Image (tube, grey):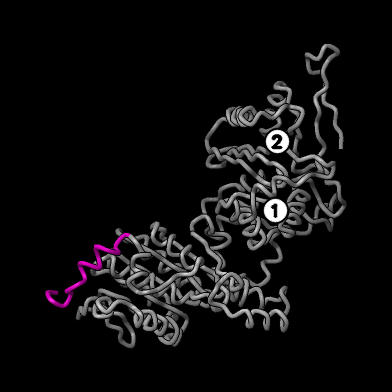
Amino acid sequence: MGNRVHGYAEIYQAVRSDIFKFCQLLHFVPTPQQCALFKEVQAGKQFIAVKSGQGTGKSASSGVIGLWRAFRNPMSRTVVTAPTMRQCKTIWLTELRKTLAAAEPILQKLVEITRTEVKIAGNGASDWGCELVTATSPINAQGYHNDHLTFIVEEASGVERPFIEQIEGTLTQKSGDKLLLQIGNPNRTACALYDAFTRFRHRWSTLTFDSRKSPLTSPETIDYLREKYGEDSNVFRIRVKGQFPTADPECIVSVEDLETCAANDMVQLSMIRGSEGQIVRRFALDFARFGGDENVVMRRVGNAIVQWGFWPMTDPSVVIGKAFKWQSDVDWRDDECTYVGDAGGMGQGLMHLFYDAGKQVVEFHNGGSASRPEYANLITEAWFHFAELARAGLAYIPNDNRLIQQLCTRKYKISNENRSVGKLIVESKDEYKKRMVEEGVDDGGSPDRADACVMAFYDSAPTGRIEYDDHGGRVVGIKVRR
């Protein structure tokens, strides 16, 4: 390459591990939302999805990312795609030209922008830089052999699932530095962008750009959309909030409500008092039955999950011991906290461990009777109770992608069983696992984290209070109270 790359080595050394130094050379000042995206890219996350309202600088962001990725890996390839070539050219490439026009002169000399590609260091070859292709056919995502590949999917909700699947397949066959970035307005749910925020969430790093929180968005535009369509309209959800249109009606909890809960102030939510004026102190435990299922413990204070743990392939009795240790660590007395344990199946044989230790315990039977007539069983009531809390933003949950994925993909139906015809009933764990396998989500893992979460927030279950003999020693029974 000789003199054609004069100056590249200096920039490479300066920016190869720091995208923010690259921003300085571009004279590009990122917003807080853009900074959050850049940090995920710099951290080496391979699958990133961004849903965004309008006017947040999303295309400018992806332009910086595509160019930085090309600079940090000599002879690397960035592939930029969108539903149409017009979107690639008039939006993404135009934004990149604007960004580069303000950059340091030495950087401008190292980048050549043509009608359909970006070339680095004046290199005549077409395999170093950024290439524009349309997402009209999965074939367009094939044939890339570079070990340092970046795929940027603009207006990602308009790209069909097979195209994204082809990119994922291409990247899994490559070594080196890889990135797939989906970014765009969340116009619809029947797309891979929606999947990244819901059923495949555990595989993706996910971000939301809310126009109301961006200094780049005109307040007048936001006010206009609010007045014309209303804050609850799909137009406002998509174009301002950066949220998908109303979610799958068969799912109990929406991903947007869960993201709100995960972003809440844990300390503030932990101070919420229950109906009896006391701050709830509770442990919820879901026990693994076999294989790759997980034992889960969640510790709740007020309306916040403040501690959590997941243990696959571990003796459940050991996990119960861990929960007891957590109680000891925070100095909770036995009479001021409650354990909610999954008492179905193998769980029934574990309940004596709580009683033997003198704990207050709720034996939670999924198929038990609900307190409200519209629910077919107890676990369904618990799920809908949690959905109400989430919808009102009155809970804090861990920002754990596997947990959120399990919570936002659990479905319900109308029961047709004789004893509960016409009542709401959540799909069983086995039904959920089978559906996840059929949809290609994973290997059929059980929604253990989600069930532990909804049990932790269920406040209508009867509490078992230990009754002792006259001398306060031997346990003689369990007194149930509502």
For marks 1 and 2, the one nearer the N-term is 2
Q: Is residue 271 left or right of residue 90?
A: right
Residue 427: which numbered mark, if any? 1
| Vertical comparison of 378 with 237: above or below | above
Q: Which residue is most to the left?
A: 2
Structural distance between the alpha carbons of marks 1 and 2: 20 Å
The numbered mark at residue 67 is none
Closer to us: mark 1 or mark 2? Answer: 2
* Identity, as a three-letter code, of the amino acid under mark 2: Gly
Residue 293 quadrant = top right
* Relative side of 44 to 359, left or right: left
- Side (left or right) of 236 relative to 73: right
Residue stretch in magenta: 1-17
Q: Which mark is residue 341?
A: 2
**Magenta span dominant secondary structure:** helix
* Residue type, mark 1 in image: Glu
Residue 85: % across, % down: 42, 85
Q: Residues within 10 Å of mark 2 (few under 14, many from 20)?
A: many
Disc 1 residue crowd, few under 14, some 14–19, many 20+, Cα 10 Å: some
Locate residue 346, reporting x and y percent: 66, 33
